[in-house]
Amino acid sequence: MNKFSTFKTKFNDLRWRMRNYKNDVKSLITNFFDKIYIGRIFKLNFFKGMLYLSPALILILIFTLYPIINSLLMAFYENYTPVDGMIDGFTLDNFKSVLKPGFLVAIKNTALIVFVSVPISVIISLFISVMLNSVKFLKSFFQTIFFLPYVTNTIAIGLVFSLMFDFDYGLINSILEFVGNTFVGDFFDLFGVTISPLHWKDSQATYATAMTTLLIYTIWGSLAFKIMVFTAGLQNIDKQYYDAAKVDGTSKWRIFTKITVPLLSPMIAYITITSFIGAFKSYTTVVALFGETGRTAGSVDLRTIVFYIYGYIMNGNALNPGELSRGAAASLMLFGIILVFTVIQMYVNKKRVHY
Amino acid sequence: MEVRLEGLTKQFTETIAVDNVSVTFESGKLIGLLGPSGCGKSTTLFMISGLLKPTKGKIYFGNDDVTNLAPEKRGIGLVFQNYALYPHMTVQQNIMFPLENLKLSRQEALERTKEMATLVGINELLDRKPAQLSGGQQQRVAIARALVKKPRVLLLDEPLSNLDARLRLQTREEIRRIQRETGITTIFVTHDQEEAMSISDKIIVMSKGLVQQEGIPQVVYNKPINLFVSKFLGNPPINTFDGKISNGKIIIGDIELGKTNCNDQNVVIGIRPEDFKVAEDGFEVSITDLSRIGRDTTVYFNLNGIETRALINSEEVSTVNKIKLKVKREKIHLFNPEAGDCINE
Ligand SMILES: Nc1ncnc2c1ncn2[C@@H]1O[C@H](COP(=O)(O)OP(=O)(O)O)[C@@H](O)[C@H]1O
Ligand SMILES: [Mg+2]
């Protein structure tokens, strides 16, 4: 005990001396910069700031900014061969050749994923978070369950989903078959709707069933992160707002729409914008369910825009001059689409979000 | 609406926050619930509001037992310590919010909102957001929001503690005025004795979850029931001395203060600073320090080893550093040293 406390004193002593040393170095640097005076604009603070930022700035220049500018230029190259870097000049043809029917299908697929999965997953995760926030019993247990998908590999979950949506022995079809044989099935029969197993993703799958499978998978996979962000946001809302509302006899639904949602709106805005951007870039989800072809065995095409871009990149060799440029053109278009939507959202948020 | 608590108790897992409290809040009065921090005032208030369920005991509004009634059915207005104004709504929307849950035409709701805004004097602020208001203005909005439903009881939890000293003085007069104008039964929680004493029709002093004393402020002040109450009320605080009663005389050290017909015993003697009077036949003390504020002078001296304060008329303090003081018998408070209870003749 005594030995330990001596050690602790010595350790704290050492820490104190180290802090003194650090302060010395700091004032040395500051004094050094104080002596340098570089014009009127580049005052000391700017110079110092740049120095501190330089490691990050250099990395960003090399690995982010340079590639961005490069791909921007590449989109306008004519017959670009990556091996020797030769081009025949500049052209807009790359954009034209990207815009063939297959790419339009990719745009449609991507748009469906974006505009269906994002709103639904935001709403579902909002409800789940509010409910999680109101349970007391086993709260962290439930939180862990809802967060599990986030720490699990997308491809692995895709395999599980593939099994669940299997025609012959998938869980979903078993349920449909069971329900179809109960009174619920009879009830729906009255309206001409038969509840029976569906071809979700096999060779006989239709566009509708395959896309539904993909959407369910996308929504489910994206819930975890949103739930985590919303739960954290909810915990920051002062409990007294709810007490005040309770005293005034506000209904649960009105409390949700008039207090919880507005007070959470910065988080909702953040999540919506980042999810939209993420959904525009969907790729792994399709691969996880339908493999690298992005198509069902029955040739239903579920490829997204990023699928096309990757396709161009993989074809981009000496034998296919210009493929990389078309990939760059496609990414530029995706960038344009995302930019437009983000700007629109920012504009809408400005009016509706209470910071 | 009279509010009556019968044996109200609230036990949290470890602490008994409110312990068997039975008090009555008279109809139409402004009643101060007073006590040091952590004594259970807020807990009592939240039980009255219905936001907290009592462990034991009953709450009556008039003749109705409301113990198990939901908060919204009790007809109360509640002002929180930090106001809890909805930050995303304007002042008008905040005040109107409670009305939106009632069956009321929008026109009527708007009129009532205007009426309340006029009452608390924030008419020209209706379109602002809470963040654009000063503390005092936010306070008024909170009161307007609590009153707009025309509740039977208004509950205020430390409504002035977030304001600076000058605003606090102003706002407490304001609360007094609003209470007078509306005639609503108001329960006002505070840890500031001066605040409670100055505006309450009645005060209830609490300590450690127990009600110590209740009554008209001046009566409680003049006749504290125990040492705690005597020490808690009054600024500067009461002077206390270890003394004794011997042969019908009240004695501190070798000074005889007065006569009593109590039995001989050791006592704690309490004397408020303003109860010392300059008198030729008094006991002599040596002044160690003086501070003169206008009409009154605070005189510091040592009485039987205790640093003592006396508040006396400035004209009666000469430059000499000896002074003769006396205390009227009814201003000498005697307490039992162990229990702290007041000893009456
Ligand atoms: N929710 C709670 N859980 C546990 N203990 C509480 C809770 N609320 C208050 N207490 C305890 O009850 C006692 C009284 O609290 P409170 O009524 O807030 O005092 P105050 O008079 O300052 O308003 C305190 O000791 C406090 O720690
Ligand atoms: Mg309190």
Image (cartoon, coloured by chain):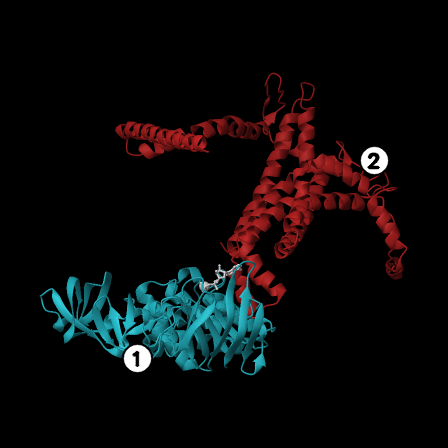
Chain colours: A red, B cyan
**Tags 1 and 2 touching, CB below 8 Å:** no
Q: Amino acid at mark 2?
A: Ala
Query: Dot 1 lies on which element?
Result: loop
Residue A163 position by quadrant: top right
Q: Amino acid at mark 1?
A: Asn
Between A189 and B204, the one lying in front of the other is B204
The image shows residue B279, relative to residue A334, as above or below, that is below
Residue B309 position by quadrant: bottom left
Query: Dot 2 lies on which element?
Result: loop
Q: Which one is closest to the eye, mark 1 or mark 2?
A: 1
Q: Which mark is residue B261?
A: 1
Q: Residues within 10 Å of mark 1 (few under 14, many from 20)?
A: few
The image shows residue B169, relative to residue A283, as above or below, that is below
Between A59 and B324, the one lying in front of the other is B324
Question: Residue at the spot x=46%, y=33% of the render?
Answer: A1
**Protein chain holding label 2:** A
**Protein chain holding label 1:** B
Q: Which residue is mark 2?
A: A297
Total numbered circles: 2
